[in-house]
Amino acid sequence: MRWVTYLSPSGGAERPGVVDDGCVFGYPGHESVPALLAENRDALADAYQRALAAPVEIIVEFETRLCAPVRPATPLTLMVGEEEQREIAPELVRGTDDGMVLPSGVASVSAAPGVAAVFGGGHRHAGYCLACLWQTPQGADVALTLGPAIVTGDEFDGSDLTVTAAIEGTVLAETVLDGKLAWTEGLRGDVVAALPARTRPLEPGEELHVDGGVLGEFELRVGSGA
């Protein structure tokens, strides 16, 4: 299953949805994506089938304005580099369609691509999504992009997760993580991320393509807004 949070074209509110066959199917209930992920697997699967059977709307995926699939209320725990553990404020979380605006006075940012693990009720692993941490040359956090979708465990076979970040076909950073959650040990929270690789400084106008295979992909132009 692939769950997203998107801006509904009919009203502009954030709404949960599922991705299937190149389209986003708007979930007909009132729960948020985090609330749905907090349920057990059977309840989540039932919600998925409800969205496919009776969607409130159907939107072609590439025309959908995607938000961060989850936006935790508390700081997220990140493993940056090989062993640096740190937290990032939840207000810095962005979706893949939210752009990458440079802070005033900052001429470039680097990107650290990786994977976020999302946990539901009882700290049960609910799924993965792509993650990308943007930082100034001084190491200050600018934003953490999550998305495009949370991909649940039924989509995986335990193989390693590989994420690349490239510009015009040239890979600038590559992350390979254990697909069996070993890297999450010692990281606390409902959303944790590992970001071991980093690109060179990226300047305004450069477009970074982040590809996570089964986790999906997205492109962001440095310096652009939503």
Image (cartoon, rainbow, N blue to C red):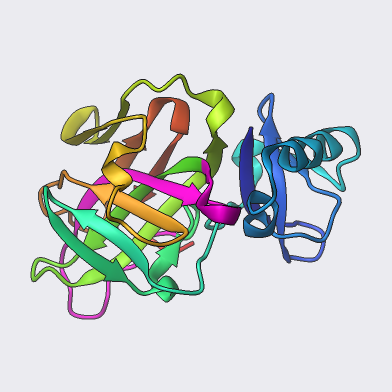
Q: Quadrant of residue 77?
A: bottom left
Instruction: Tell me: 152 left or right of 218.
Output: right
Viewer-proximal residue among 132 and 196: 196
Q: Quadrant of residue 108?
A: bottom left
In the rendered image, the residue lying farthest to the front is: 122
Above or below: residue 154 compared with residue 117:
above
Residue under the image location 24 percent in, 35 percent down: 166
Residue under the image location 44 percent in, 57 percent down: 191
- Residues shaded magenta: 99-126
Residue 175 makes an appearance in the image: yes
Q: Say whether residue 194 is magenta.
A: no
Residue 221 makes an appearance in the image: no
Q: Say whether residue 113 is magenta.
A: yes
Instruction: Tell me: 151 left or right of 183.
Output: right
Residue under the image location 52 percent in, 57 percent down: 68
x, y percent for residue 158: 40, 23
The N terminus lies in which quarter of the figure? top right
Instruction: Tell me: 127 left or right of 116.
Output: right
Q: What number of labels is visible?
A: 0
Viewer-proximal residue among 223 and 53: 53
